[in-house]
Amino acid sequence: METLKLPVLPIPNVVLYARTSLPIYILEPVYIDMIKTCIKENTPLAISKAFEIDRHSLRGRYSPSTICGYGRPIILEENIDGTLKVLIKAIGRVRLLNIEQNLPYLIYQAEIYCDRIESEKLHGPQIQNLKKLLDNWLEINILDSFERETFTNSLTSIYHVIDYICMFLVQDPDLRQLLLENNSLFERVQLLNSLFEKPSQFEESSIVVSAIKRYEEIEKTSRIAH
């Protein structure tokens, strides 16, 4: 399995998907230095959904989720106070393995995290439902027709459609992470069609969200037991 060394930026409730671009604001000096170093050295970085740990821990206040997205940073704007508006152009997903550095910021050894090879066939109506869902959302949220068309033309595969639905429409942070960790395209299509039954439905079904979380918790407990 291919491995690489990545600086890691843990951010609460933020998930970076493999075929998306994510704008973020960088306020802390240590992470401003991280971004500039990555650009200078042409090094990608990982953006990981953070969970809070002991605020007095030497490893920092937040710890990263093991599965996360990684990509290359582009500085869009540098303010007078030094803070940055940055676009992260995602490359893919990784699994964080061993910590190489704790301070001033986290650096991990990581391995590429890919979808598994599947025999299940994707159903045309389910794919069309998701494409129509995203098209409808874009129609309402990107008013400039040229900008909307440019963005739509960049969606060259079902992977792009799925990742942007997860990014734009899925509101529950834990569910976003579960979708990122899921390594089955077939299952992600099924899950999103369960969450958004109609192409005009822009909020995930809370009942389905709860059911998915309960199922994942049972699966996790089962894996630990074995």
Image: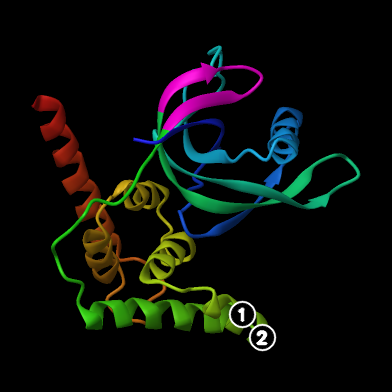
Instruction: Give the residue displayed 48% in from the left and 19% down from the top.
Output: 99
Q: From the viewer's perspective, is residue 115 above or below residue 202?
A: above
Rate crowding at label 2 as few (under 14), some (14 to 19) or many (20 or more) other CA atoms within 10 Å: few
Instruction: Give the residue displayed 72% in from the left and 27% down from the top.
Output: 30
* Residue 146 marker: 2
In 3D space, how far apart are the residues under numbered discs 1 and 2 (Cα atoms)? Answer: 6 Å
Q: Is residue 112 magenta?
A: no
Q: From the viewer's perspective, is residue 40 above or below residue 22?
A: above
Instruction: Give the residue displayed 35% in from the left and 82% down from the top.
Output: 199
Q: Position of residue 106 (x, y in %)?
A: 57, 24
**In the image, 183: left or right of 169?**
left
Q: Amino acid at mark 2?
A: Phe
| Camera-side residue of 161 and 24 | 161
Instruction: Give the residue displayed 17% in from the left and 47% down from the top.
Output: 215
The image quadrant that residue 123 belongs to is: bottom left
Q: Position of residue 5 (x, y in %)?
A: 52, 29
Q: Which quadrant is home to the N terminus? A: top left
Q: Residue furthest right?
A: 80
Q: From the viewer's perspective, is residue 185 above or below residue 4?
A: below
Q: Is residue 109 magenta?
A: yes
Q: Position of residue 122 (x, y in %)?
A: 21, 72
Q: Which quadrant is home to the C terminus? A: top left
Rate crowding at label 1 as few (under 14), some (14 to 19) or many (20 or more) other CA atoms within 10 Å: few
Task: Read off the residue under disc 1.
Answer: 150
Whether residues under marks 1 and 2 lie with C-beta atoms below 8 angstroms apart, the answer is: yes
Q: Residue furthest front?
A: 2
Q: Amino acid at mark 1?
A: Thr
The image quadrant that residue 38 belongs to is: top right
Q: Which residues are magenta?
A: 97-110
| Camera-side residue of 121 and 174 | 121
Element carrying mark 1: helix
